Image: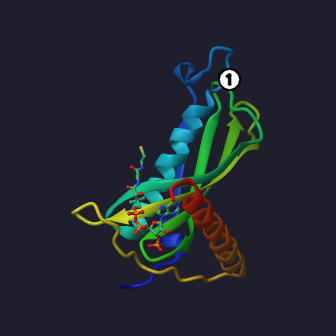
Amino acid sequence: MEKKTPAESLTILSQVMMPYHASHYGNVHGGIIMKLVDEVAYVAASRHARCNVVTASIDSLDFKHPVRIGDVVTLRAKLVFVGKTSMEVEVHVETERIKTGETLPVATAYLTMVALNEEGHPTPVPQLILETEEERKKYQEAKLRRERKLEKIKKVYP
Ligand SMILES: CC(C)(COP(=O)(O)OP(=O)(O)OC[C@H]1O[C@@H](n2cnc3c(N)ncnc32)[C@H](O)[C@@H]1OP(=O)(O)O)[C@@H](O)C(=O)NCCC(=O)NCCS
C-alpha cells in the first residue's frame, strides 16, 4: 500500500454560525462544534484511507473562546499518526468575528478514526510520510497518547 503525506488528506471546513446553532443564552452550543470536529476528522481520515471510517475515540476537547452567532468557524484537520488500521487526526478550530476580521482559537481535539472494510472489520491504511520536524514531533506525541489511551481502554473495557 502506497504511503501518503498528511498534506494529501488535509481538510479545511468553514461554516457561518446561524441562530439555530445557538444555546438558550445566545452563543453557539458546544455540541454543534463537537459535531463539526467529528465531521472534519471523518473527511480527513476518509481521504487518507479511501474507505469507510468510524470514530473510535475523541481524546480531549478544550474550549478556549466562545463562538458567537454570525461568526465564521474554521476547522483544520490533519493526520498526525497512523497505526495499522487506526489514524489519529488533529483538529484545530478557530472563530472569526466577521465584522472585524479578528480570529480566536476555539478548540483543539485529537480523534482516533478506524478504517473498516466492506464487512465492517478494521482494515489496514497507508502509512504516513513525515516530511517536517513538526510532523515527526507530533507523530511521537500521538504515539504516547495512543499508548496511554489503549491502557485506559483496557481498564474501562477489560
Ligand atoms: C473502533 C472499532 C471498529 C474497533 O474495533 P476492535 O474490534 O476493537 O478492533 P481492534 O482491536 O482490531 O482495533 C482496531 C484499531 O483501533 C484501535 N482502537 C480500538 N479502539 C480504540 C479506541 N477506543 N481508541 C483509540 N484506538 C482504538 C486499535 O488500537 C487498533 O489500532 P491499530 O490497528 O492501528 O493498531 C470498534 O470498537 C467500533 O466499531 N466502535 C464503534 C465505533 C462507532 O460506531 N463510532 C461512532 C459512535 S456513534
Residue 16 seen in the current view: no
Residue at 71 percent across and 81 percent down: it is 133
Residue ranking furthest to the top:
24
Q: Quadrant of residue 42?
A: bottom left
Foreground of the two, 143 or 68: 143
Nearer to me, 65 or 31: 31
Direction from residue 2 to residue 90 in the image, left or right: right
Colour scheme of this structure image?
rainbow
- At x 61%, y 66%, the residue is 151
Using the image, determine if residue 103 lies above or below residue 31. below
Q: Residue 52, relative to residue 128: is it above or below? A: above
Q: Please rate how many residues cluster around mark 1, counting C-alpha atoms within 10 Å: few if below 14, some from 14 to 19, many from 20.
A: some
Image location (x, y in percent) of residue 9: 47, 66
* Residue identified by numbered label 1: 27
Residue 76 x %, y % = 59, 55
Residue drawn at the location 55% of the way across and 62% of the way down: 154
Which type of secondary structure does the marked residue at label 1 adopt?
loop
Residue 20 percent coordinates (x, y): 52, 20
| Amino acid type, mark 1 | Asn
Ligand number 1: quarter of image = bottom left
Quarter of the image for residue 67 reads top right
Residue 118 shows up from this direction = yes
Direction left: furthest residue = 119
Q: How many marks?
A: 1
Q: Nearer the viewer, residue 40 or 38?
A: 38
Q: Quadrant of the N terminus?
A: bottom left
Question: Where's residue 58, x and y in %?
Answer: 57, 52
Taking the spot 42% from the left edge, 72% from the top edge, the residue there is 85
